[in-house]
Amino acid sequence: MDSSPLAGRQPPDCAAILVAAGRGVRAGAGEPKQFRSLGGVPLLARTVLPFVHCEAIARLVLVVPNPEDARRRLSDHLPAGAPVDYVQGGDTRQQSSAAGLAAAGNFPIVLVHDGARPFVDEPLIRRVLEEARRSGAAVPLVPVSETLRRVDSEGASLGTVRREEFALAQTPQGFRKEVLERALRWALESGFEGTDEAELVEKSGQKVTRVEGSAANIKITTPEDLARARRLLDEGPASDGLRVGIGYDIHALVSGRELILGGVKVPHPFGPAAHSDGDLICHAATDALLGAAGLPDIGQLFPDTDPEWKSASSLRLLEEAASRVRGAGYRLVNLDLVLVAEEPRLVPHLPAIRTNLARALHCSEERIGVKGKRGEGIGFAGRREGMAAQAVVLLAREEKPVR
């Protein structure tokens, strides 16, 4: 029997359609709502990431007003190689859903999610997926917690209604592909315009099953919603905008490889076994930067399966990461880093290393701290089998528009 962690895991069988083709006029003046900055990251990018990280999702289709513009705005904020397609949206929600479904491929399960719900999480995605596989159609619902009153067209109160009989519908909504195709076809033939896909499926004769929604899964519609979302990200007036990140890297040592630390070639008979140049100092600093800004880590942005990064300069990766961090709206306060190695001595190379790091990070050298620690004969470093580096970064928010 296979007892590995992957044993029995459901293979990817789902396409997710993120509908974000609206003009967002209720969000007020400014750039389109789906591209407004939320924590220095476009709102739509934050919505996409939980689906990227869900192993059951094989393809993502973003339905947007302008595919090329959306690709340009989002590419720096999504992991390299993420299975994302961009599709032109329609004039209505149903037209956009149909366009997304046509581009979704032949997967048995389809999710449809509002591009303006950036706080969706993977547990909710999985709940909807599992129920859609079981019953054919699923919608997340949240109980109504406030008292509901019925009003007339003039706004006059006509009495209280039982809130237990009502719930708030959310997305993602999940369907077997043929169920959603049939519902969209019925709506087109009937001239019916629904509020969401679950309503179309119900009207076309298919039962939709309820799953537990999430109170945090709010939809951004108005300027007040956007302000609330920023408070949820701790960006309100009480926040000082500081973010801390930790980076760590470790490599075994092998003969015949150059030892490069902080962009400096250090004379040594051994070097790191690595896909890139194996620069531990730059790798640890890069992951600390990306982590502090809430961006995908070095393995996602610069995967070792991509030939572009084979033997690549790690200073180049650090500079690219720093550019993405600035694009996310942060500036470096300081970087502190320690290299654990029995040999060689790091002190003679520290000035050059600090200069290289400061240049890559576009900051002064006084913001960079680098030190070496010996293994003292203990562990892999002490036995000269490998080296490790750990970095801590402090970032501060610097309000600027997202590119």
Image: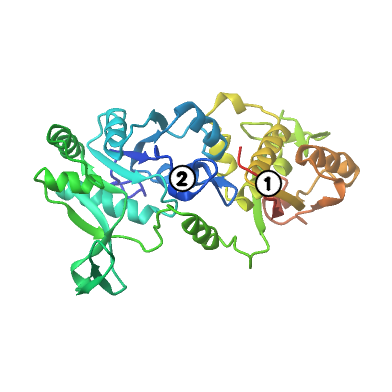
x and y, in percent, of residue 245 in the image: 65, 54
Residue at screen point 41% across, 30% down: 86
| In this rendering, position of residue 196 left or right of residue 312 | left
Q: Amino acid at mark 1?
A: Ala
x and y, in percent, of residue 69 in the image: 51, 29
Residue at screen point 63% across, 65% down: 237
Against 40, residue 102 (above or below) is above
Residue 214 visible in the shown view: yes
Kindly identify which residue carries mark 1.
284
Against 395, residue 90 (above or below) is above
Categorize mark 2 by other alpha carbons within 10 Å: few (<14), some (14-19), many (20+). many
| In this rendering, position of residue 65 left or right of residue 279 | left
Which residue is outermost to the top? 307
User: Of 163 and 101, which appears nearest the observer?
Assistant: 163
Camera-side mark, 2 or 1: 2
Residue at screen point 38% across, 29% down: 87
Quarter of image, res 298: top right
Residue at screen point 34% across, 45% down: 113
Q: Find the distance from the CA under tag 2 to the CA under tag 1.
A: 23 Å
Q: Secondary structure at mark 2?
A: helix
| In this rendering, position of residue 49 left or right of residue 319 | left
Kindly identify which residue carries mark 2.
49
Q: Amino acid at mark 2?
A: Leu
Q: Which quadrant holds the C terminus? A: top right
Q: Mark 1 or mark 2, which is nearer the start of the sequence?
A: 2
User: Of 2 and 333, which appears nearest the observer?
Assistant: 333
Q: Are marks 2 and 1 in contact (CB under 8 Å)?
A: no
